[in-house]
Amino acid sequence: MKHRISSLLLTGIFFLCAGCGAPAASGAAEPASLQFFSMDTVMSITAYGEQGQAGVQAAREAVNRLDGLLSRTDPDSQISRLNAHAGDGTAVEVEPDVAELLSFAQSVSQLLPGDFDITIAPVMDAWGFTTEERHVPTEQALSAALALVDSSQLEVDEAASTARLLQAGMEVDLGAVAKGFAAGEAEEALREAGVERATIDLGGNVTVIGTRPDGDPWRVAVKDPRNTDGYLCILELEDVTLSTSGGYERYFEEDGVRYHHIIDPKTGYPADSGLLSVTVVTANHVLADALSTALFVAGPEEALDFWRSRDDFELVLCTDDSRIIVTQGLEDAFQLYDQDGGYTYEIARR
Ligand code: ADP
Ligand code: MG
């Protein structure tokens, strides 16, 4: 099985075993596929059926529209306008769905205090993550940046579709939720075009629509955070979205120490919670993206406590002592990728 899986090529954190196994039923056309660069990552969308071509085009447009609205590095984006007016009292007009996204991100900060905050931007800048000059910041620079992180100082008026940052110097960075949001819009575009089977891979955020053309579930692989050419496990899934966060995707090294891009808002340092990666599986795209980041910061115990307090998502956690923790709802979907891969797995129950 291992050979069959690894002989197929795909990009992103996940590998979608889209075409493996028996050939599709006779008469099934080749899928329409698009690969493109958006939101600072490589994305690929594949859609089956007659509407496939129209669907993938519409999905790409939806993603690019959001990139234009949400990017912090594009000075014309709505988020850049919001940031530029920090502290000057201006309520900046944003699209209704952007206002909704900002409110949702704030609610995640309230659910998981100290783990997640979209006003983390000044800290990202202090580390140079937004530029190519990454470096360990001085304690002084870090504490000045941390003093600006507080999403309760972000005022969102969903009815008026405006947002305002109350303190000068504050900035919003939607890196933790933008791709999930885009995945939701891409799925909607595909479904509106009439597509019933598709895979969307937005660099770490994977969505599967329907089943494979042969009627079997999609096989989605979760990358091994220690060896990104390998995989932790395969999940057999239909109509669901997944988001993975880990310290292995974007990082730099200084004096032999590795620093990654998911920051613990309590310390201003890259999160070191005992987890190497977190995969969230759910029907809600933005929830998946936000929680994969937040629970990576939270660590395994808090992540499982939070899972037990809700019923709208499932988890695959990879710990730094080489355990894979899979929540109960994924028990039937889960297959360990490599028995000799150095990982053990356990099922977490409610
Ligand atoms: P990726 O974008 O690599 O898929 P994530 O979804 O986990 O990974 O998002 C990481 C991004 O989120 C960072 O690049 C940064 O923009 C932002 N971020 C980092 N730490 C936090 C945090 N604690 N809370 C909210 N956003 C964060
Ligand atoms: Mg995320």
Image (cartoon, grey):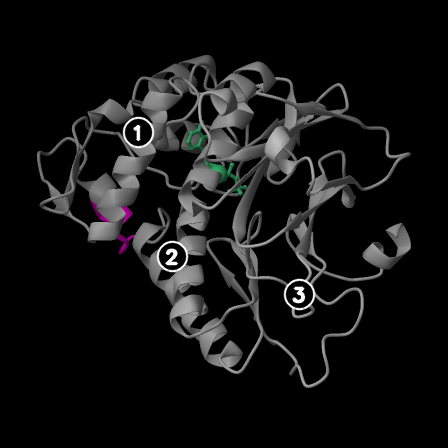
Magenta region includes residue 109:
no
Considering only vertical position in the picture, is 323 above or below 312? Answer: above
Give the number of the disc on residue 107.
Answer: 1
Task: Give the residue type that dot 3 points to.
Answer: Gly
Residue 136 at least partly seen: no
Which of label 1 and label 2 is nearer to you?
Answer: 1
Which of label 1 and label 3 is nearer to you?
Answer: 3
For ligand 1, tell me if the residue under mark 2 lies within 8 Å: no
Circle nearer the N terminus (3, 2): 2
Task: Give the residue type that dot 2 points to.
Answer: Asp
Q: Where residue 127 sits in the image (x, y, percent)?
A: 49, 29
Q: Secondary structure at mark 1?
A: helix
Q: Which residue is mark 3?
A: 215
Q: Where residue 259 sits in the image (x, y, percent)?
A: 61, 27
Q: Which residue is mark 2?
A: 67
Q: Residues within 10 Å of mark 3 (few under 14, many from 20)?
A: few
Q: Magenta residues, as a range?
A: 75-81
Considering only vertical position in the picture, is 149 above or below 240? Answer: above
Circle nearer the N terminus (1, 3): 1
The quadrant holding residue 120 is top left
Q: Secondary structure at mark 2?
A: helix
Cα distance, mark 3 to mark 2? Answer: 33 Å
Give the number of the disc on residue 76.
Answer: none
Considering only vertical position in the picture, is 332 above or below 197? Answer: above
Q: Residues within 10 Å of mark 2 (few under 14, many from 20)?
A: some
Q: Residues within 10 Å of mark 1 (few under 14, many from 20)?
A: some
Q: Nearer the viewer, residue 271 or 317?
A: 317
Circle nearer the N terminus (1, 2): 2
